[in-house]
Amino acid sequence: MTALFDPRDPAVRTDPYPIYRRLRETDPVHWSHFGYWVLSRHADVDAVLRAPGVSSEFYRNEVWAERRGGLDSPLVSSVRRWMLMLDGPAHRRIRGVISKVFTRGAVERLQPRVAAEANRLLDAMGEGEIDLIDSLALPLPVTVTCELLGLPTDNRVQCRQWTEQISRVIDPSITPDDVAEMNRAETEFRSYVAGELDRRRSASQDDILSLLVHADVDGVRLTDEEIIANVLFLFVAGHETTVNLVGNGMLALLRHPAQLELLRSNPALIPGAIDEITRFDAPVQIVSRLLDEEVVLDDAVLPAGAKVMLLFGAAGRDPSRYAEPESLDVTRTGIKTLAFSGGPHYCLGAALGKMESAVVLGELLGRYSKIELTGDELVWRPNVSFRGLERLPLRLFR
């Protein structure tokens, strides 16, 4: 018998939306034989994100931890300190420090630098046939994250490779080979960041890494292990989301040419269009939660002790929340995208990721009079939690 939802199904990577629609219509509170409740309605996903007694500390699940190398493996030891995977006071303590990095003013001050880097990459791309992912979407956010933290940008390619490997940690479809790569990448990345921390102690600089070394909450400083783990997390969260948002957004616009031309003729719509793109094809598709207490939905009760899989991509196309959800409409208002999560774990870097994506789209549409998709067969990355393309082959005309 075919499972109604199987994260290992290749279709979940290539085109999950028909699967999501079937779930919403036939079994929106779905009990999976993988041992998860799978939620696909916007209201249900939003309710779980905000409910008390809902935990992000998935490392506490023995099966989850063992599938990633065990509780004491390099990877899980790091994840246990990520603010993404912490609840309550432990989460608020680290978030309180990291939030100083992502104020509105800090993001606005970064915009000229993001635009300059985007234009440098576009200058190198030129015109003709290019791959947008490799030429622009991948290098831009990792460069921005390096500069934000104060890490040397000449190591950005290696940082990108480590980030791509570690990001599989939340993927429900990982293999033993993935686990080996993730643990190796975590060990190497941790050693690199530890060396940078030592340098900041010898000579503090005007950068975020120095701020993290010296910052404290109620007189208590972050440990080196906490700093290093959350630097790795910032790379994963910032890099993966922005790469996929840029790639998915451009693909969606190319498949809806009237919407692309609307943005080209009215660039002021671009910031709002980013919210619509995240709704239409979310860069983060799936997150999971543990229930320490039962959660009551409109027509179901999820028991304490349950594991829940939240389908952000399905929630974004829920017709009970959005009119004509299968259509891309860059003028749509009233969007409450869950692509950056919600509740106490709403993504601190959401404003930065949306700003980067808006800058990229604005520069692309302003520079090129015509953008064409070349080739019909697109290859999606194997990570089902982060939805993104391996390549986006385009032909550019000035």
Image (tube, rainbow, N blue to C red):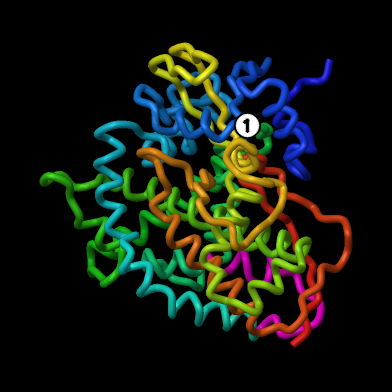
Quadrant in which residue 362 is drawn: bottom right
The residue type indicated by label 1 comes to Pro
Rendered-image quadrant of the C terminus:
bottom right
At a point 54% along the width and 24% down the height, the residue shown is 308
Q: Is 129 within the magenta?
A: yes
**Predominant SS of the magenta segment:** helix
The percent position of residue 23, horizontal first and vertical second, equals 70, 27
The quarter of the rendered structure image containing the N terminus is top right
Foreground pick, 223 / 114: 114
Q: Residues in magenta?
A: 124-141
Judge whether 50 appears above or below 237 on screen. Answer: above
- In the displayed structure, does residue 192 sit left or right of residue 312? left
Residue 307 relative to residue 261: left or right: left
Q: Residue at x 65, y 38 (%)?
A: 319
Label 1: which residue?
172
Residue 300 coordinates in the image, percent (x, y): 53, 15
The image shows residue 385, relative to residue 105, as above or below, that is above
Quarter-of-image position of residue 292: top left
**Camera-nearest residue between 13 and 60:** 13
Between residues 74 and 170, which one lies in front from this camera angle? 170
Q: Does residue 181 appear in the picture of this structure?
A: no
Is residue 24 visible in this depiction of the protein?
yes
Tell which residue pokes out farthest to the front in this image: 323
Q: Is residue 232 magenta?
A: no
Identify the residue at horizontal 62%, vertical 56% (top origin).
Answer: 244
